[in-house]
Image (tube, grey):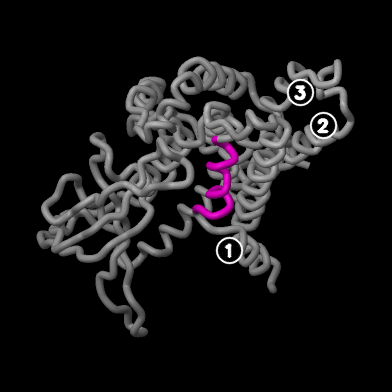
Amino acid sequence: MLDTRLTEEQQQLRKTVEAFAREVVAPVSYEHDKNKTFPYAVVAQMADMGLFGLPFPEEVGGMGGDYFALCLVLEELGKVDQSVAMTLEAGVSLGAMPVFRFGTAVLAGGEWVVNGTKAFITNSGTTITSLVTATAVTGTTASGKKEISSILVPVPTPGFTAEPPYDKVGWNASDTHPLTFDDVRVPEENLLGERGRGYANFLSILDEGRIAIAAVATGVAQGCVDESVKYAKQREAFGKPIGQNQAIAFKIARMEARAHTARTAYYDAAAKMLAGLPFKKEASIAKMVGGEAAMDNARDATQIHGGYGFMNEYVVSRHYRDSKILEVGEGTTEVQLMLIARELGL
């Protein structure tokens, strides 16, 4: 068994972000969700805390932490607001991490001309969006297959358009747009990493990102437990708190077991990744288990809260709407099962 105890520094980070989530994020969460507004002030405070630079070395402007530290932060944010958690997750895992991992391009003197569209892109249309990473066909390999490379596109650039935001079921305070590229010209040195390695690099980033998504999902699952315990102790029916009823108590106990299992899964995947060991299977397990735990716990928490669980001002109702995407985004549950089976040689 892997030792999953947190160091004193990790505990302090977790407690700091737990307080930030409770005191800063949670109080404005409902208003941003209701109005479908991006939480600029919250994001600015996260930036001031160094959270967007958490897993990067100090010599490149980061905080000198690691990916597991990021996951601990995402779990705490996920307890109270999935939109905020995903803004950080996407900004680091899908935005900054590819640049850090593969940013080795040199000036070549020409231009790329990018045409096409892409759907469901996070953090792509805010006033603080400064670039997007596009994976594009840049040629043909010797075997006749498409050559796919990653290209950094500055924002704004003529021909690049972030289309109107989606009307989503959940994650209402998370910025998500379809993108259009119409003869977008960028310098050749904006190639990110080696030409032709864009797809492979993208897949490696997704493996890491699934651990981060699992951390968010674990936070959601645990947040649903915490809210249900609090409500079950306060809400009385037939002369006693509903938590004294075995049906409610057992339902919450099962929710706690799901959250614990999800946490154990993402801790294990993160430990393998940081140790330099293969972790593709473990990342898929963590993502699948976490997503299902979040969805199941959100459903049960809504049931425990009764009519209040159907009111948007209660965080469990927002978790119920938001959690479904955790079983879909960055690889559906079915994709995770396919990857796990493939790793087993099936």
Contact (CB < 8 A) between labels 3 and 2?
A: yes
Does 121 sit left or right of 256 as displayed? left
Name the outermost residue toward the front: 238
**Residue located beneath label 3 in the image:** 232
In reply to whether residue 319 is colored magenta, the answer given is: yes
Does 53 sit left or right of 219 as displayed? left
- The residue at 69%/73% (across/down) is 346
**Residue located beneath label 2 in the image:** 248
Name the outermost residue toward the right: 246
Camera-side residue of 201 and 301: 301
- Residue 338 in sight in this render: yes
Q: The residue under label 2 is which amino acid type?
A: Ile
Residue 41 is tagged as none
Camera-side residue of 6 and 82: 82
Camera-side residue of 272 and 170: 170
Label 2, secondary structure: give it.
helix
Q: Position of residue 75 (x, y in %)?
A: 58, 33
Q: Which residues are magenta?
A: 318-329
Q: Which quadrant would residue 134 be assigned to in this image?
A: bottom left
Compared with 156, 51 (above or below) is above
**Residue located beneath label 1 in the image:** 335
Q: The residue under label 1 is which amino acid type?
A: Val
